[in-house]
Image (tube, helix red, strand yellow):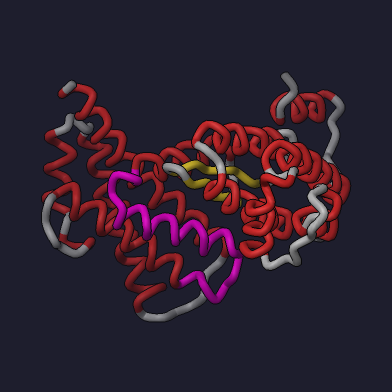
Amino acid sequence: MVDGKRIQEFWSHWEHEPNTTEEFKRFRIRITEVSRKLWDDFFKGEGQKSRRERFAIVSGTAYSFNEYFQQSGLCSLLTQAKSVFEVANAVQYYLWTAEEALTHGNFDYFCRQLQEAFDLSPSIMIRLVRHGTKATLYRTGVRLLDEALVESNLIWLSRYPAVSKHFETALKLYASKDPSQTRNMLDSLRFALEQMLQVTLNNGRTLENQKDEFLGWLKQRGVHAQIRNMYQTLLAYFTSYQNDAVKHGEDEYTEVEVEFVLYAAGTFLRLILRLQEQEAAKST
């Protein structure tokens, strides 16, 4: 089966550096063609009028009495898109409409088809993440990290709504690439970690006052002393960074450091979730 990995391997064999403009055009065509197929499967026909009307409302596009994809607001959004975000925005409207209208099995198929189109565009950093019955598009960095720290975290965090809410908010703010939202994004990461530790340790302490109890929790679960020390240091510096750069309003952040903090927080959450998963497996 052709996928992004095979495409990248082919590029590597030919020492090819993909042209950003050309790859975006291919990406937009792939998404448009998959969207057309899904439209024909689930939105075309007199019986699907309500779904087309709902898409028009969700997307803010004019409703067309013509049932064909070529006359739809979705087609207009995709063909007129000038950036990756504009394509992602159109697809997200499509996903929101589909998650309301389709059965679980059909929605799974719907998401798989779109994800395959994303996978065939390896230079375009987008990933479709499922959490429960919903699907959200995220801007990604390193695919392997994102699968572990974004997708898996969201799946496991669904059991902790307060934590999931803050972590997902942070991801959405990060994906927006709006510098004015960076502080809010970092605040949301702090709240996610704070809530996670409070739930895990069954207390109401602030993040900076969890060190001793959290280290004890890690030790009880067989985490190596050096790993415990590493996380003690990470927690200390994370809270210091939050106090210096966020609470005290420096409001000067580089994209690199913000990405680092996001992945550091994701790794922190990932450790706790994996230990809980391991503990649950032992008790069954």
Q: Quadrant of the C terminus?
A: top left
Q: Residue at x 58, y 43 (%)?
A: 128
| Outermost top residue | 1
Q: Is residue 244 magenta?
A: no
Start-end of magenta stretch? 157-183
Is 186 left or right of 257, judged from the image as shown? left
Is 264 left or right of 209, judged from the image as shown? right
What kind of secondary structure does the magenta stretch mostly adopt?
helix
Q: Is residue 77 above or below residue 68?
A: below
Q: Residue at x 60, y 43 (%)?
A: 127
Q: Nearer the viewer, residue 84 or 31?
A: 31
Q: Is residue 265 above or below residue 45?
A: below
Residue 23, percent across and down? 83, 44
Residue 204, percent across and down? 14, 61
Q: Residue at x 77, y 59 (%)?
A: 73
Give the quadrant of residue 60: bottom right
| Outermost bottom residue | 249
Q: Nearer the viewer, residue 262 or 215?
A: 262
Q: Is residue 175 magenta?
A: yes
* Visible residue check, residue 199: yes
* Visible residue check, residue 83: no
Is 105 left or right of 83, judged from the image as shown? left
Q: Residue at x 72, y 18 (%)?
A: 1
Residue 114, percent across and down? 67, 39
Is 46 left or right of 95, judged from the image as shown? right
Q: Nearer the viewer, residue 96 or 153?
A: 96
Give the quadrant of residue 102: top right
Residue 26, percent across and down? 84, 42
